[in-house]
Image: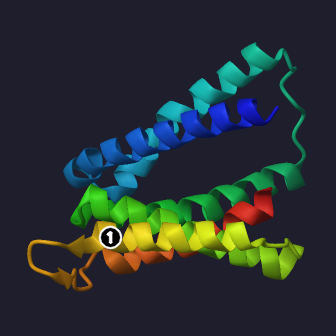
Amino acid sequence: MILTAVIYGAVAMFAFGVANAFLKAPAAQIGVIESILVRNLAAVPVLAVAWVLISGAAIPQLSFSAVLGGVAIAILGYLPFLFFLQALNVGEVGRVIPLTAVVRIVVSVLFGVIIWADALSFFDLAALVAVLIGVFLVTYEFRSGHITPIKSWVVPAFGASVLWGFLYPLFG
């Protein structure tokens, strides 16, 4: 069971990493909002059909409240995505993605501890510290010997990761 979860997690990490790296070019060429629109117009119908075909489930009857809830979740989910693409549009992929990932993890963990009363072990805290150190090393410029100054991509990247950090535990 754990091996299956690790395999799924590794595939998801790889897919997210590759997808995020490839988002920089369209965001720069056609714009941030246009990139989100094209992505959704292509992905949502394909995923909906694949879900029906793979699961064998019938298309569900949707109530007004279910549709309204879905729209709210979509807006809440894509607001951080908008910030993320803005950060990718002006920042380096190798710096934006690690920052958004680590802040998202820290906020999700803190949110889980505060709201859901999740317990953290010593090893959980040690792993969190290791991740923070890793992101610091990614953003550190060894050639010049100083920490990269705050640039225009940091604020939207930080905003995206904080919003994602609050949203992920709510959907779990």
Total marks placed: 1
Q: Nearer the viewer, residue 12 or 123?
A: 123
- Residue positioned 85% across, 71% down in the render: 118
Quadrant where the C terminus lies?
bottom right
- Residue positioned 46% across, 66% down in the render: 100
Task: Give percent across and percent down for residue 115.
Answer: 84, 78
Q: Is residue 76 left or right of residue 53?
A: left
Q: Quadrant of residue 3?
A: top right
Task: Give percent across and percent down for residue 30.
Answer: 25, 49
Are there few (<14), some (14-19), or many (20+) residues within 10 Å of tag 1? Answer: few
Task: Give percent across and percent down for residue 68.
Answer: 79, 57
Element on which disc 1 rests: helix
Q: Quadrant of residue 120?
A: bottom right
What residue is shown with label 1? Answer: 137
Q: Would you say residue 134 is visible in this rendering?
A: yes
Q: Of the residues shown, which amino acid type is indicated by label 1?
A: Leu
125 w.r.t. 171: above or below = below
Q: Quadrant of residue 105?
A: bottom right
Task: Give percent across and percent down for residue 86.
Answer: 34, 65
- Residue positioned 66% across, 20% down in the render: 50
Quadrant where the N terminus lies?
top right
Q: Would you say residue 163 is visible in this rendering?
A: no
14 w.r.t. 156: above or below = above
- Residue positioned 62% across, 71% down in the render: 126
Q: Is residue 60 left or right of residue 13?
A: right
Q: Is residue 37 left or right of residue 22?
A: right
